[in-house]
Amino acid sequence: TPYRKILLSSPVHAVMLCHFAFSFSTSLMQAYLPLFLRDLGLPIKTIGWYTLTPFLAQIVAKAFVGLAVDYTVANGIMTLTNATRAAQSMGVFGSSIMLLLLPFLPNCDNPTISFYILLVYGVLYSGGTCGFYTSMLSISPDHIGTLSSIAGVTRIVSSVVATLIVNGLTSMVN
């Protein structure tokens, strides 16, 4: 395995940065979202459902996004590269916009808007699966095991960093 070439490859760096960012976002959502919803004054049972919403949305949306990407490629609407880019753009920009709206639109008088933001966030976030996750196969299909392992380590490091940041921020507030 040409480890040096893999580790110094710009496309690999880009994919690993995506793995880091998406995992970081997921970890922040899992750690911080219940606290945010609590501060909006939601009851504990509602907090559980709202926290689950983006992840349930992803389960459903990933299947449809995958089918849509396959359809566009199979019918010559887009090349595989462009379909992957479109899915990745949906995942990055769409979910980022939802995360930017989350602290500003809901408030204690109208916390329900957070449910809809989280739902749309989950749907849009799903684009990343057909984006950077599948791009590893395009970069180096012969070394997908190595790339998958590097991606796994990247996601673990990202989750640890996100958790440390949340712990640091919450200890500063408390």
Image (cartoon, rainbow, N blue to C red):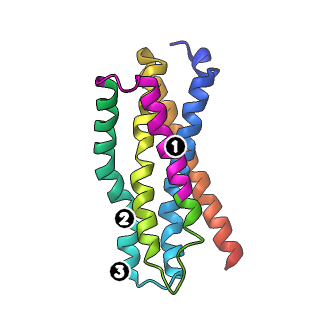
Q: Secondary structure at mark 2?
A: helix
Q: CA distance from mark 2 to mark 1?
A: 22 Å
Q: Secondary structure at mark 3?
A: helix
Q: Give the left or right position of residue 129, taking residue 174 as reference.
A: left
- How would you rate the neighbour count of disc 1 (Cα within 10 Å): few for under 14, some for 14-19, many for 20 or more? many
Q: CA distance from mark 3 to mark 2?
A: 13 Å
Q: Main secondary structure of the magenta part?
A: helix
To which residue does mark 3 refer? Answer: 45
Q: What residue appears at the point 57 percent right and 19 percent down from the top-left corner?
A: 6
- Vertical side of 148 occupied by 123: above or below: below
Q: Amino acid at mark 3?
A: Lys
Q: What residue appears at the point 62 percent right and 16 percent down from the top-left corner?
A: 4
Q: What residue appears at the point 29 percent right and 44 percent down from the top-left corner?
A: 64
Q: Secondary structure at mark 1?
A: helix
Closer to the camera: disc 3 or disc 1? 3
Which numbered tag is attached to residue 155? 1
Mark positioned earlier in the residue sequence (3 or 2): 3
Q: CA distance from mark 3 to mark 1?
A: 29 Å
To which residue does mark 2 refer? Answer: 53
- How would you rate the neighbour count of disc 2 (Cα within 10 Å): few for under 14, some for 14-19, many for 20 or more? many
Estimate the x, y position of residue 91 in percent, counting from the top left: 48, 45
